[in-house]
Amino acid sequence: MRAVQYIRVGEAPRVVDVEVPEPGPGQLLLKVTAAGVCHSDLAVMSWPADRMPFELPMTLGHEGAGQVAAVGAGVSRVAVGDSVLVYGPWGCGVCRVCAQGRENYCPHAEQLGIFPPGLGAPGALAEYVLIDSERHVVPIGDLDPVRTVPLTDAGLTPYHAIKRSLDRLTAGSVAVVIGVGGLGHIAVQLLRRLSAAAVVALDVRSESLDLALRSGAQHALSSDEWAIDAVHELSRGQGAAAVFDFAGSAATTSLATHMVGRDGDLTLIGIGNGSIDVGFESVPYGTRTGTTYWGTRSELIELVDLARQGALDVLVERYDLENGPDVYKRMESGLIQGRAVVVP
């Protein structure tokens, strides 16, 4: 089968031929119907050899959808022919955290050598992908896999972050989304659907600000120091009840720190190497600051239900598998609007 692989540190990914895997006991083989492409892959491919925790070559793609092509012994809840999404952050499945469905925070996975597909395990940028357990797929029925596959990360990550802050997002409050890309434009839609807060979107690109408004943001502002005064004005001097930073650069974390209000939430989601200095003089009193990682299995099921209700309109750019490496070039150049999806 054809697959997009990261073969050597410092080299661009390539499309190569690899063997089709066979499912063992408890495993599933999916014929890939769609695979999302993420900035996280660019981050992985920027690491030097001494920081690379994954064995290479590695098939990329941690957003996956597919049709069940074969199942191993013991699989009983999923049948050949089912259309499913892949839940990416695999855990051990037996600890207290995993028992709560929060495999994204499993404390044992890395020690046990359990990695997400595309981030350690062979990913979905291929014609077939092997899934370790039936608990790691969510049936989607007749939903379009191309438009639904971004929910597995680009939707799940902001959904998880926003749910943690819903108690802050009451009527009259302001929520700020920094970075309106693949994750950010879904975050805007989720905030409008789930909360009563006014949504303010920030970005440096005019086309992203247009996307924010089309996604439901009441305000779209250039991501600069003037936006700080605008957010405080829109919040009647209170500051934002919650700020979600999907860029995570030094510049955006500084903006976020100056926009969040007292007893507000500041969530760093992007991996742009920025950081937040937390202290009595660096953030407003009562500020809850933190990071997140993906989301829970139950939250992915909830997102699929929202998609069935027509609540989400994910902007996708569609590419074929042979052009997979070029998608990363376009992404690095900032040419992707919404989410890039590869269809074998």
Image: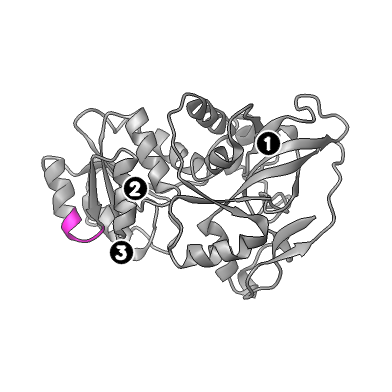
Q: Is residue 313 left or right of residue 49?
A: left
The amino acid type of the residue labelled 1 equals His
Residue shown at the point (86%, 45%) measured from the top left: 22
Q: How far apart are labels 2 and 1 at the CA level?
A: 32 Å
Task: Provide residue 236's location: percent of width, then percent of height.
Answer: 11, 40
Q: Is residue 234 above or below residue 209?
A: above
Q: CB of mark 3 within 8 Å of CB of mark 2?
A: no
Q: Is residue 78 left or right of residue 190?
A: right
Q: Which mark is in front, 3 or 2?
A: 2
Judging by the rendered image, the residue that carries numbered circle 1 is 136
Q: How far apart are labels 3 and 2 at the CA level?
A: 22 Å
Q: CB of mark 3 within 8 Å of CB of mark 1?
A: no
Q: Secondary structure at mark 3?
A: helix
Q: Is residue 206 left or right of residue 71?
A: left
> Which quadrant would residue 252 be assigned to in this image?
bottom left
Residue shown at the point (69%, 73%) measured from the top left: 8
| Residue 243 shows in this picture | no
The answer to whether residue 224 is magenta is yes
Part of the protein shown in magenta? 223-227
Judging by the rendered image, the residue that carries numbered circle 3 is 251
Q: Is residue 179 above or below residue 272?
A: above
Task: Provide residue 269's location: percent of width, then percent of height.
Answer: 43, 51
Depth order, front residue of 218/315:
315
